[in-house]
Amino acid sequence: MKHRISFNRLGRKSSHRKALIRNMVTSLFRHERIRTTEVKAKEVRRYAERLITRAKVDSVHNRRMVARFVQDKAVLAKLFTDIAPRFVSRPGGYTRVLKLGERRGDAASVVILELVERKVEAKPEKKKREEKKAESGSKEEESAVQE
């Protein structure tokens, strides 16, 4: 029976599980989107949402409490200055889980865990590629006309 079991052990010892969750939460805050299995995502989501809730109020105590878990100083600063202010008016539900399908090797359910209000950066590389294609197309037309 599974009475009074409040978390998923993920088939790991406590130190391995703690390190895994810390690293995944840090990666989530750094990249604002991670790809993982559904079971891990649901477990990581619990910790990430608690940390965001705590980071919404920027105090020394909250910074120290979050720093116990997120040990990368750059990610910690990003959480308090960039991520948490986006969610000030939201009472909870800071992350979403998007299902991708099953992994080929072991048929594990793979998902994307992402922040609901994440910044999407435009990639200027595509524009450059399109311009290069247009230029090369016009050069080919000119060479065909000359022949």
Image: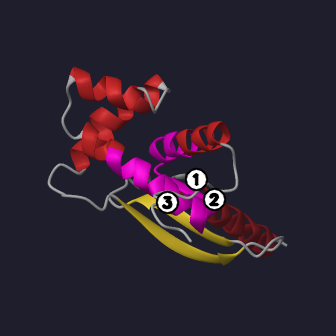
Eye-nearest disc, 2 or 3: 3
Q: Secondary structure at mark 1?
A: helix
Q: Amino acid at mark 2?
A: Arg
Q: Residue at x 50, y 53 (%)?
A: 44
Q: How far is the residue under mark 1 from the one under mark 2?
A: 6 Å
Q: Main secondary structure of the magenta part?
A: helix
Q: Amino acid at mark 1?
A: Glu
Residue 60 placement: quadrant: top left
Q: Secondary structure at mark 2?
A: helix
Eye-nearest disc, 3 or 1: 3
The boundaries of the magenta stretch are 23-50
Residue at numbered disc 3 = 5
Residue at numbered disc 1 = 125
Q: Is residue 33 magenta?
A: yes
Q: How far is the residue under mark 3 from the one under mark 1?
A: 49 Å
Q: Which residue is situated farthest in the bottom direction here? A: 101
Mark 3–mark 1 CB contact (< 8 Å): no
Eye-nearest disc, 1 or 2: 1
> Where residue 84 sits: x, y (%)?
27, 43
**Nearest to the observer: residue 62 or residue 127:** 62
Q: How far is the residue under mark 2 from the one under mark 3?
A: 53 Å
Q: Residue at x 79, y 67 (%)?
A: 143
Residue 123 appears anywhere in the view: no
**Nearest to the observer: residue 141 or residue 30:** 30
> Where residue 138 sits: x, y (%)?
67, 68
Q: Residue at x 62, y 41 (%)?
A: 14
Mark 1–mark 2 CB contact (< 8 Å): yes
Q: Quadrant of the N terminus?
A: bottom right
Q: Amino acid at mark 3?
A: Ile
Task: Return the mark for residue 129.
Answer: 2
